[in-house]
Every structure is written in structure tokens, then in C-alpha cells.
Amino acid sequence: MDLFRTSTYSTLNQYLISISLTILTAVVSYFSVEFIGYRIVALILLLVVSLLAMLFDIFPVLVTALLSALIWNFFFIPPTFTFHIGTPEDALMFLMYFVIAMINAVSSFKIREFERKARDKEEKEKSIKLYNILLNSLSHELRTPIATIIGAIDTIKDNETKLSNNNKKELYSEIEIASFRLNRQVENLLNMSRLEAGILKPKLDWCDINELIFSVIKQNKENAENHVIVFEPNEDLPYIKSDSGFIETILNNLIHNSINHTPIHSKIMINANIIENKLLITVSDNGLGFPKDKLLLVFEKFYRLDNKSGGTGLGLSIVKGFTEALNGKIILQNAEKGGAIFTIEIPVETSSINELNNE
């Protein structure tokens, strides 16, 4: 809750809250002192100082500790309404109260500082680890297609008159494939940065889910030449109101993931259905599946399975982010006969073609 995020409070507000709470406690205790005794009041005030020490900076707490000691002395220790202390026992108790309140304030502050430094160190180490993972991934995933493009262009330039038309077509094809690969990695990086910044907002519009899936399959046709993508459209599906761009990105990354991490000639199956105003899309394959203890980890940013090479580890985290941006959820399971099953569930508004025409 925002109320307890006291680290964001200004120094002035910390002073005001600390002093006000101490005075309020003293007033309540003053009208109860006949029942609880002035020594119990000291414990109550000390408790307030301890709580404030857990929430605020050192100087407002030290001021509170000093103020509470003076209030206890003036209003509660006999004789009252004077700073004179009548007995040596009360004088010793007052001194102990003041010392304990100060030590408590300083100790709590030191503990909070230690915890903050430990937390900052942990976050720094995590950031360095993620940076190294990203750097290692990008050094391969971006450098490889760039090197392919440069190499193909140099070959064409140096051997323009010697190359046959077939050789030129092959080199142009390599440039095209490498360009698409480079573009995919850049798009994934941009999408992840937009997700983290919270600037990606879905734009809802009517679309045909069958047509959308066919479009995504066509986009991955060349990349999936060693795989079989199977999709049987459901002609009874109504139009849905959602962000087609988001769904397209989700499907592209799921299909790309299946193509890259399944053996050649594997089958990738896509199914779509609508149940109770929820769009259900499954993307499954007959590959090797995932280790059971990694089913949740694969959606983490930059995470890659140890036995898999290539990729920046962003694809599935983007799938999860875009799905959640549509208020949906994604579930990953291993198929009984081998392979993985990704299930996307997104709440949607539906309408038939006749209803759309009337609109």
C-alpha cells in the first residue's frame, strides 16, 4: 500500500508525522495514566519511537526520541509539569529511557541501511548477470545475420561478373533470411523495452481469427520449410474484438520458438476456439517438450534452456507480456506423447458477421 511507502515521504513530512504521532500518544496516555501508571507510559512511548525508527530516516527519529523523553519527564514523572525528577530511581529510569530510545533509533536505522545496501548489491549483481546474458545473446544473434549480409554483399561485389544467376539468387536469399532474422531480434528487443516501460496499450478492433492465423503461418512459411504447420480453421468462429497486432506477435513468437527448438520435420499444430467469451489458442508440437522443473522459468526474460542454442531468450517472455496486456494468461504443458502445448486464453468480445454489418 502507498500509505506504508514511507521512504518516499519528504523530510518535512517525516518530522511532522513523527512529532504528531508522539504528541497524540502522549495525550492519550495522559488521560490514562491513573490506570496504567507513568512507568507503562514510558514503554508505550518507547514503542512509538521503535515503530518510527523502522519507517523514517535517522534525524526525525532522533528528534522524536528526544521529544518523547522530555514529554515523559515533564508530564508524567513526579513531580509533574517540571523537569525536576523527585527520586533517584526515576532519574535512572529517565536516563535509561533516553539512552535506549536513542540506541533503538540508531540501531534500526543501521539495520535498514544494511538491508538497503544488501538489496542494492543483489539487484546490481542481477542486473550485471542479465546484462552479460543479453550481451552474449546479442553477440551471436545480431552479429551472425550481420556477418551473413556483409559476406553475401562482398561476394556479389567482388564476383559480380563471375556469379551465375542461381548463385546470385542464393546469395540474395541468404541476405533476405538474415535480414528477417535481424529484424525479428530488433523487434523483440523493442517490444520488451515497451512492455517494461508500460507504453504498449492494446487497440481493440474486430478481426477474423482464422484469417489472422493464416497470415502468421504465411509469414513463417520460409522459416518453417523443414517443419509442418497444421491449422484447420473453424468456420463457426465469430469475429472477435481484440488487438490483432498483439495476437500476431504472440503467435509469431510461439511458432518461431517451436521451429527453433524442435527436430526437423516436427509437426506444429495450431487450434483456435471461443468458449464463454474467451479466445483459446493452442500451439503444440510433437518435439521433445520441456523439463518439468523449467516449465515456469521459460517465460522469464533472457532465460534459455541449457541444452538449447541460439535466441536471446526474449520470445516467450514477450508472449507472456503481450498475453497479460490483453488481460489473458498463458499455460505451458508437456504433451503425454511428447512435445509442448502452449495454451493462450484471452477474454474477447464476439460478434457475427451480420451483427457487424448492422453496426
Image (tube, rainbow, N blue to C red):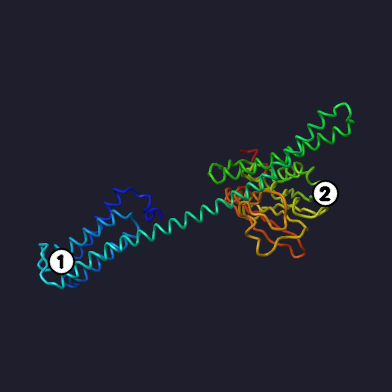
Q: Residue 76, labelled with which disc?
A: 1
**Residue 193, position as x, y percentages in the image:** 57, 43
Q: Quadrant of residue 329?
A: bottom right
Residue 221 lies, with reference to residue 57, above or below; the image says above
Image quarter hosting the N terminus: bottom left
Q: Select label 1 or label 2 by which is in front.
A: 1
147 relative position to 115: left or right: right
**Residue 332, position as x, y percentages in the image:** 67, 59
Question: The disc labelled 1 sits on which kind of residue?
Answer: Phe
Question: The disc labelled 2 sits on which kind of residue?
Answer: Asn
Q: In this orientation, which residue lies closer to the viewer: 50 or 324?
A: 50
Q: Residue 284, labelled with which disc?
A: none
Kind of element beneath mark 1: loop
- Looking at the image, which residue sits at the far top? 161
264 relative position to 44: left or right: right
Q: Decide which of tag 1 and tag 2 comes sooner along the chain.
A: 1
**Gap in angstroms between the C-alphas marked 1 and 2:** 87 Å
Residue sitting at 18 percent across and 61 percent down?
71
Q: Which residue is mark 2?
A: 226
